[in-house]
Amino acid sequence: MSAVTQTRAFPSPPVNRREILRYAGCAAPDARLDALLDDCLREVQGAPLQYGVCFCRLPLRLSGETCDFGAFSCRSAQLAACLRDCDGVVVFAATVGVGIDRLIAKYSRLSPARAVLLQAVGAERIEALCDRFCETLPAETQRRTRPRFSPGYGDLPLTVQRDIMQTLDCARRIGLTLNESLLLSPTKSVTAFVGLECAGQAR
């Protein structure tokens, strides 16, 4: 894997119905809810979902709570702790595209229950995409990896989104933009760091 930003498309990951229902807050689904979920999944499959990721590998230097990636730096005690004993990171942005946002907006007016399920489907889809991408990294980098860590989690500020977006050129590569409130569009999108442990690092 080079330090140059790369773009990768993925096929649709397998659907985890249990996760969708968890995101929707449905502990004990009944036949009616199962049928509605089936309808939602069929409609989403017909929407122009685009499973896209752009990413690059950056060096890492830690100094207390400051994480210096060469291209930019940030201050976060929790991210620094996550990246301890790492000498590099993969920074990435992932999205499933704007298609599901359009469906959610449509059904927010027509069928709130369906909109809630579609929100949950979108959440499950982007998480599945991130999981699939992260699964490829150990073999590609020849390094053990740390769990991904996203802006807005813990003490890592959302302002870091600006640096990630600029470094990866997300708008051009995968159509991902950032608004003035530091929210991503399309909404079912994620940015994150994945630590790469130093070569020979023991668990």
Image (cartoon, rainbow, N blue to C red):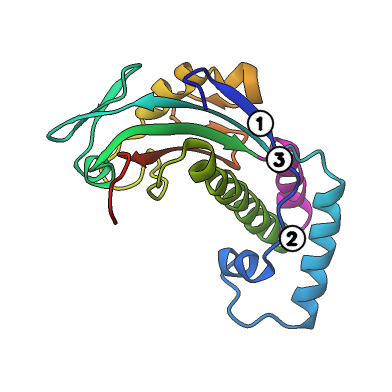
Rendered location of residue 131, percent (x, y): 56, 51
Secondary structure beneath dot 2 equals helix
Q: Compute the Cα span from label 2 to label 1.
A: 31 Å
Disc 2 residue crowd, few under 14, some 14–19, many 20+, Cα 10 Å: many
- Which residue position is annotated with label 1? 8
Left or right: 51 as drawn, with respect to 127? right
Amino acid type assigned to the residue bearing label 1 in the image: Arg
Give the mark nearest the N terminus, 2 or 1.
1
Residue 203 falls in image quadrant:
bottom left
Left or right: 186 as drawn, with respect to 179? right
Amino acid type assigned to the residue bearing label 2 in the image: Arg
Rendered location of residue 128, percent (x, y): 61, 53
Determine whether 175 is above or below 192 in the image.
Answer: above
Q: CB atoms at circles 1 and 3 under 8 Å apart?
A: yes
- Which residue position is annotated with label 2? 114
Picture disc at residue 10:
3
Q: Nearer the viewer, mark 2 or mark 1?
A: 1
Q: Residue at x 73, y 83 (%)?
A: 30
Would you say the magenta stretch is mainly helix, strand or loop? helix
Residue in the foreground of this view, choosing between 182 and 164: 164
Q: CB atoms at circles 2 and 1 under 8 Å apart?
A: no
Residue 1 lies within the magenta run: no
Residue furthest left as drawn: 64
Q: Which residues are magenta?
A: 96-112
Rendered location of residue 57, percent (x, y): 44, 27
Left or right: 128 as drawn, with respect to 71? right
Amino acid type assigned to the residue bearing label 3 in the image: Phe
Q: Compute the Cα span from label 2 to label 3.
A: 26 Å
